[in-house]
Amino acid sequence: MNRWFTCCGLFVAFTLTAGLALAQGPAVSAPNGKIEAIGGSLDGDSTKALAGSLSVPLGDLVGVQIDGAYGELDNDDKLIGIGLHLFVRDPSQYLLGLNVMHVELEDTEMRRYALEGEYYMGPFSLTALLGQQEGDVDDAGFASLDLRWYPLDDLMLEVGGGIADSDKMLHLGAEYQALAGLSVFADLATGDDDYDHVLVGARYYFGTQKPLIRRHREDDPANNLVTKLLLGLDNSPAASRPALPPEDPYDN
């Protein structure tokens, strides 16, 4: 694990250095934030959550974002998460950075360390996460890859998938900015072990008013505590919850 962290640290340093050399900036157009409310069904259980993010520029080429989330699964299991992004970005071309997350689901804790990237191609964006998870779960790698299409400046359609350990998931998503700063979104997914979710929500953006495509490329990166943790991979049994101990055959 120490070797992995060393390699990851060197790669992040190289990535950020290379990104700084190429970036035209600004990584974050101005201090901004967002809050989001989510509800729906996850593996047949009712799910609701609140999440928020705050992004600020560090100079012209580097940005930092803090994420938070709180959720309830089946009106019983509590989920609490915090996250941090450190990134460089050229809003006309790409984002490169590091995303660190810590999540607690009842008595289960998980930490994730990931490289994140975005590449912008006209009305299309390619987004990716690649990293490692540890804690009260199996230490394992995870990854996700999503393609976003903006047929309208205020409408995003998304298709993608991910893997954590050996569990895979595919999803479809959409977000529409209906009013200035206010958007609605939905996410549908299916995965291994009969996993599925149907989730909808509303998101409000604080800061300068602009089209949705520019918000996604000029302001705050996605809050992955919601899009990658609460919305699927880490709620599949093998990816996020510790295995139950074997039953004692002599226990009556």
Image (cartoon, grey):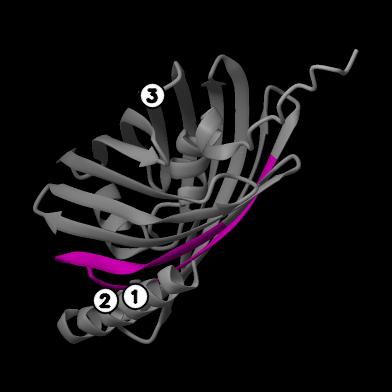
Q: Residue at x 47, y 25 (%)?
A: 199
Q: Earlier in the sequence, mark 3 or mark 2?
A: 2
Magenta range = 79-101
Say which amino acid is labelled 2. Answer: Thr
94 left or right, relative to 140 = left
| Number of residues whose C-alpha sits closer than 10 Å to that of mark 2, classed few (under 14), some (14–19) or many (20 or more) | some
| Number of residues whose C-alpha sits closer than 10 Å to that of mark 3, classed few (under 14), some (14–19) or many (20 or more) | some
Mark 3: which secondary structure?
strand
Mark 1: which secondary structure?
helix
Q: Main secondary structure of the magenta part?
A: strand
The verdict on residue 94 being magenta is yes
Residue that badge 2 annotates = 15
Asked whether disc 1 touches disc 2, contact meaning CB atoms under 8 Å apart, the reply is: yes
Q: Earlier in the sequence, mark 1 or mark 3?
A: 1
Whether 143 is drawn above or below 232: the answer is below
4 left or right, relative to 71 = left
Residue that badge 1 annotates = 12
| Number of residues whose C-alpha sits closer than 10 Å to that of mark 1, classed few (under 14), some (14–19) or many (20 or more) | many
Instruction: Give the CA separation, mark 1 to mark 3.
Output: 30 Å
Residue that badge 3 annotates = 191
Say which amino acid is labelled 1. Answer: Val
Q: Position of residue 137 (x, y in %)?
A: 59, 45
98 left or right, relative to 135 = left
Say which amino acid is labelled 3. Answer: Gly
Whether 25 is drawn above or below 94: the answer is below
